[in-house]
Image (cartoon, rainbow, N blue to C red):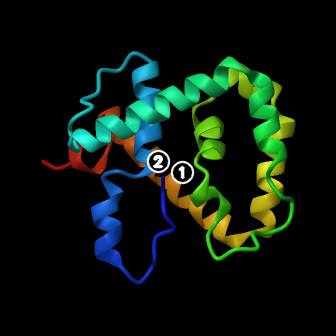
């Protein structure tokens, strides 16, 4: 769902930033917390992307054992391929960023494996940072505290 973005192609980052995984996850969280967000503000493909993420999140939440099994597939060592594992498989960040706080507290051992991997894999650490940055910026924007809302 997300591709590793090249640092050399700033234009590609700007185009893809509208449909980033981090922004979509923040929108999912905002909607789950009762915030009214416009699903079509980035176009119809954004709404479809959000819908597929919501369905996948609900699938994973329905079976906590599946979340545990998912996190057990994360290698402790770095990625062997040129593509970051976290860029190829968004489920890890989907669960980590949008999981219910009580469920997250119960599964900190699972999340530890994610952070062990990122400690050994710079590509996945970079991907996590990109997604988390977009997630935090979008949450700020949706709450009315973003850069676009501070302009007078």
Q: Residues within 10 Å of mark 1 (few under 14, many from 20)?
A: some
Please tell me which residue is depicted at 39% across the width and 15% down the height of the picture. Answer: 34
Residue 22: numbered disc: 2
Please tell me which residue is depicted at 54% across the width and 51% down the height of the picture. Answer: 132
Please tell me which residue is depicted at 28% across the width and 50% down the height of the picture. Answer: 147
* Label 2: which secondary element: helix
79 is higher (above) or lower (below) than 7: above
On the image, the x and y values in percent for residue 119 come to 79, 64
Residue 27: numbered disc: none
On the image, the x and y values in percent for residue 26 come to 44, 37
Q: Residues within 10 Å of mark 2 (few under 14, many from 20)?
A: many
Closest to the observer: 145 or 127? 127
Tag 2 and tag 1, C-beta contact below 8 Å: yes
Answer with mark 2 or mark 1, whichever residue precedes in sequence: 2
- Relative placement, left or right, of 88 versus 81 is left
Q: CA distance from mark 2 to mark 1?
A: 6 Å
Closest to the observer: 57 or 38? 57
* Label 1: which secondary element: helix
Residue 132: numbered disc: 1
On the image, the x and y values in percent for residue 67 come to 74, 32
């Amino acid at each position: 769902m997300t591709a590793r973005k090249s640092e050399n192609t700033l234009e590609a980052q700007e185009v893809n930033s509208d449909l980033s995984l981090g922004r979509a996850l923040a929108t999912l969280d905002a909607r789950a917390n009762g915030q009214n967000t416009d699903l079509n503000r980035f176009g119809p493909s954004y709404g479809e992307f959000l819908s597929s993420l919501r369905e996948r999140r609900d699938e994973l939440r329905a079976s906590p054992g599946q979340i545990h099994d998912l996190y057990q597939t994360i290698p402790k060592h770095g990625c062997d391929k040129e593509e970051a594992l976290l860029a190829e498989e968004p489920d890890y960040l989907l669960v980590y960023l949008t999981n219910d706080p009580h469920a997250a507290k119960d599964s900190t051992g699972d999340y530890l494996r994610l952070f062990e991997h990122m400690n050994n894999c710079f590509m996945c650490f970079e991907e996590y940072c990109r997604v988390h940055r977009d997630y935090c910026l979008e949450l700020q924007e949706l709450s009315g505290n973003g850069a676009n809302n501070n302009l007078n």
